Image (spheres, coloured by chain):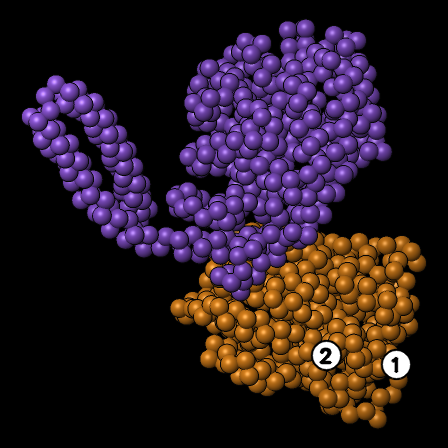
Chain colours: A purple, B orange
Amino acid sequence: MKAICFYFQIHQPFRLKRYRFFDIGNDHYYYDDFSNDDIVTRIAQRSYMPAAEALLGMLEKNPQFRCALSITGVALEQCEQYVPEFIDLLKKLVATGRVEILAETYAHSLSSLIDPEEFESQVKVHDDKIQELFGVKPKVLRNTELVYCDELAPQILAMGYKGVITEGAKHILGWKSPNYVYSAASAPKLKILLRNAKLSDDIAKRFSNPDWDEYPLTADKYIDWIANTPADEQIVNLFMNLETFGEFQARESGIFQFLEALPYFAKERGVEFWTPTDAVTKLKAVGELSIMHPISWTDESRDTSAWLGNKLQNEAFQKLYSVAERVRLCDDRRLKQDWYYLQAADHLFYMATKHFADGAAHSNFSPYETPFQAFTNYMNVLSDFIVRVEEQYPLSIENEELNALLTTIRNQEREIETLNKEVSSMRKNIEHFNEEHLLREAKAAEAAKPVAEKKPARKACKPKAETAAKAEPKKPAAKKKAPAKK
Amino acid sequence: MFGWEFPPHILGGLGTASYGLTKGMWECGDMDISFVIPKPWGDEDKSFAHIIGASQVPIAWRDVNREYVEQRIGKYMDPDLYFKLRSHIYADFNYMRTNDLGCLEFSGRYPDNLLEEINNYSICAGVIARTLDFDIIHSHDWLTYPAGIHAKQVTGKPLVIHVHATDFDRSRGNVNPTVFGIEKDGMTHADHIITVSNLTRNTVIEKYGIDPAKVTTVHNAVTPLSDELLNVQVNKPKEKVVTFLGRITMQKGPEYFVEAAAKVLKNNHNVRFVMAGSGDMMDKMILLAAERGIADRFHFPGFQKGKQVYEMLKASDVYIMPSVSEPFGISPLEAMQMGVPSIISKQSGCAEILDNVIKTDYWDIDAMADAIHAIITYPAMYNQLREDGLDEVNRITWDKAGAKVIDIYRKVIENR
């Protein structure tokens, strides 16, 4: 028994407009709406929508077909804005119950490498968004660009995910095969799914390359390769961008027909389709996998050098996360939104100064002519953003001090709330007490009218005065403190 | 080779490039190079080429003895060569203003009677061509094209001309017809044309109507700097320094630098701008800086020579070359050698081979101001450009350029 585990990635960053340094402090809108609209609409029409329709058709015709999708929060936002019809298609796909949605960072950020708190909160925000749109809760996590290392595993497990997806990088695997489920060395309960780089890239990168010695690739031949892997290798993880279909590989190359034909040949050869959740529940881990340094699915080196490979990228990355704590403290919605958009790893990707094949890949996607332009523009935007964060909370106050002040404010709020509750419950008690008393009084009156009348009146007054005294001196004190902190 | 300038007595990039290329070719081995210049000073580096001064070439017979020649020009030329040359005088030039050795005087600069000097140079070239034994003629820039053509006609040897600049670059399109005529003539007679950038190559093809197959680009390179120059000591001002180094002429786009400076200073006051050099637009630029109200932060230290150039660079944080049209532009490479991040215009030939520089359009003062701001505000940007720039520029060496030129020679000789 063998299974294919498909997962398709959907991501589009909010590209920045040309932002000059004299805009710093004057212009707080950073995005190139025209090109974002243009690019997202074009890719949706050429790739996302036809691919989603193809998947829908495959699900209808092949009851055994299953797959997973991963959509970043920022991509979802852009689709909602520019191509809402694609969201409808996605909803249809998820409604079949055979398409899984994976968890990931909302902003397609590299927060996992620097700021665990931010990472967790972003994954949570993303899960909420998925729940809101599709009514499902993701169970397997796919970190941005498949970034993963041992350090992350305990956190991911604690966040409640059963499995994590990463790259089957050669320098990590060595002689091992990616076609098994592994468990994390630092958190053995967390299962790891590894991308089969060769078979994934056969589709994603080589499919329409006439210089490739396997060209042309047919579904028949491809399923043959999978079926002919060693018998005890049970799962082949094919992870790729959804843009592979129609954008990286043009429609004319026959990529859609190839995709649609896969389930038929798979059925013939007895190959099943699983979602990542299926894989981590059905299969036992064959062994532990230790990954010391972060790996990813990008560039030849399969590490984080695509985003953090030179001084420019590291400077931008450090600067950005230097304000992370402050941004989390504030609740300005626009600031939070910009915070997410600016974290997209793509902005760092454009600053790469790599050469040869990797360099070509970087400049292909970049809206900038040079990495230096990318850096300048991003830093100018970031400078303005930091100015705005500082306006909310002046830099002169240390983070810890600020934190302490904010906690007292929050604590006071909570205190006021509990006191209010206390007051209202006491009021209820008094009312209750009064009612009971009246009843008793009535009974007593019936028994002995003139004697009992004075006593209960005095008792009822006493507790009322007490509660008033308790509640009042605290309230004004709290009020006095609160505005001073703002 | 015919050239006009040779270090250490140079007036522009031509001398540096001729020197570097000749040395680079010599390093490739198996080359015997004679380099003709109008006027040698005696302190030229003769280790890799025979320097022949046109001002020591006799064009009229004078009966002088060996001792006299030795005493008069021994510093510049071997007397044997003088006598050899004397026996190859091909016409009677006594009507010209010759001196006691039958030689012409040259200024070796760009005097007002430049055209006359070019003509005289070509007369001397005739004598030299008849005397020496060589396989190929190589003329550097339009001043020496007539000499090259003359030598070719006399000997029938192939002529390669090296276009370091065209008049379209120098004049922003208002071409001097005489200069254009000389250039066009040289290109037509040449067996092959070497240009210093694809930008110049296109000018040669489009503006001069030359067959593209005959034109090849060989980008310039740089000679490694001595440790003495790399480690010059200067007192750095507190502020960041942005430097422009070059002739202050229309071709170099100085006004765009002033405008960009005004933009930067509006937001960032911790910076000074320097426009070092001289030229016909200097006064205008001083006026413009005053008009923009930035004269207190914009400095004109005048023409810099020799070591001063490197001191200037050492004190700088940014080097800028906003040239409107620059056939190659060697100065940003020198700045990079000194570890100074550079901003260059896309209209410069060196933009074709450099990666670790900021490239903007010469007219895009917004982008230029932005780039200046980025380098002086973001340390990562400065360090990245500085270190990778150093690495990059150290790989651009003359021996590679020399090898390409030798390759062209080979093809030209084979095709005859």
Q: Looking at this view, is B363 or B175 the one in front?
A: B363
Please give the name of the residue rendered at 63% of the width and 15% of the height, measured from the top-left corner.
A179
Q: Is residue B19 above or below residue A397?
A: below
Q: Within 10 Å of the Cα at label 2, are there few (<14), some (14-19), or many (20+) other Cα atoms? A: many
Asked if marks 2 and 1 touch (Cβ < 8 Å), the reply is no
Percent x, y for residue B271? Answer: 46, 69
CA neighbours of label 1 inside 10 A, class few (<14), some (14 to 19), many (20+): few
Q: Which chain hosts label 2?
A: B
Viewer-proximal residue, B326 or A275? A275
Are both tags, 2 and 1, on one chain?
yes
Name the residue carrying label 2: B38
User: Can you tell which quarter of the image residue A224 is in?
Assistant: top right
The kind of residue on which mark 2 rests is Pro
The label on residue A265 is: none
Residue position marked by numbered label 1 in the rendering: B90
Question: x and y percent of residue A1 in the render?
Answer: 68, 6
Give the vertical position of A35 relative to B20 (above or below).
above
On the question of residue A64 being in view, the answer is yes
Number of labels in the image equals 2
The subunit carrying tag 1 is B
* Residue B43 found in image quarter: bottom right
Please say whether residue A169 is visible from this viewpoint: no
